[in-house]
Image (cartoon, grey):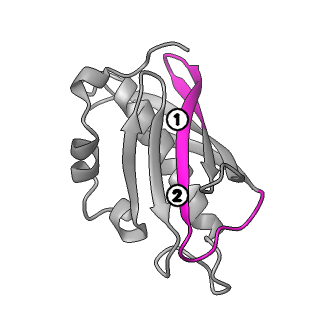
Amino acid sequence: METLFDIANIRIEDLNERCKNTLNTAIGFHYTRITGSTLHAELEVSDKNCQPMGHLNGGTSLAIIEILGSTAANLVLDASLQVAVGQHVNAHHFRPALIGERVYAHTVALHIGKKSHVWEVLIENAVGKLICKGTITMAVIART
């Protein structure tokens, strides 16, 4: 797998701090690990991010895809010159995650181009069963 991230200069603590008081903290989402080609995060299913039946809300899963893919795309770019913004997100939901369960997500690049990126995000439960799989297409634009 191709190395995309400069892991010597990216600290998980800094990513989480940068996202304080955003949707990340509102839903209980936080980054946990980065490798040369993947970014990992987790979330505990709670009343902040579930639907009335006590299952992880599908919108929360889409938010995870958006947040994780967007962060990964922007970590690849020279932030002084470019920014990646969400253009299209889609997902398939396979099984529920219930209140009290922890879900784990990671993203990998499917395409890194000059004008767009496509990132795949997998959300799994504690035993590795797939909860949701999605992709996000990011438009790469010049920073103004």
- Would you place residue 116 above or below residue 27 in this image? above
| Residue 106 within the magenta-colored segment of the rendering | yes
Instruction: Tell me which residue sits at (61%, 70%) in the image.
Output: 56
Tell me the quarter of the image containing the C terminus: top left
Hey, what amino acid is under mark 2?
A: Ala
- Of mark 2 and mark 1, the one earlier in the sequence is 2
Q: Position of residue 74 (x, y in %)?
A: 38, 32
Part of the protein shown in magenta: 94-120
* Residue closest to the eye, 144 or 9: 9
Q: Quadrant of residue 135?
A: top right
Residue 55 vs 114, above or below: the answer is below
Q: Note whether 97 is above or below 106 in the view shown.
A: below
Q: Is residue 91 left or right of residue 61?
A: right
**Residue 98 placed where, x, y %?**
63, 74
Name the residue tied to disc 2.
63
Disc 1 residue type (three-letter): Met
Residue that label 1 marks:
138
**Secondary structure beneath disc 2?**
helix
Secondary structure at badge 1 equals: strand
> Dividing the picture into quarters, in which one does residue 29 lie?
bottom left
Question: For the point 52% across and 58% down, which residue is it?
Answer: 63
Image depth: mark 2 or mark 1 in front: 2
Magenta segment includes 130: no
Q: 70 or 53, which lies in front? A: 53
Image quadrant where residue 35 sits = top left
> Callout 2 environment at 10 Å: few (<14), some (14 to 19), or many (20+)?
some
Distance of mark 2 from mark 1, alpha carbons?
Answer: 14 Å
**Left or right position of 67 against 52:** left
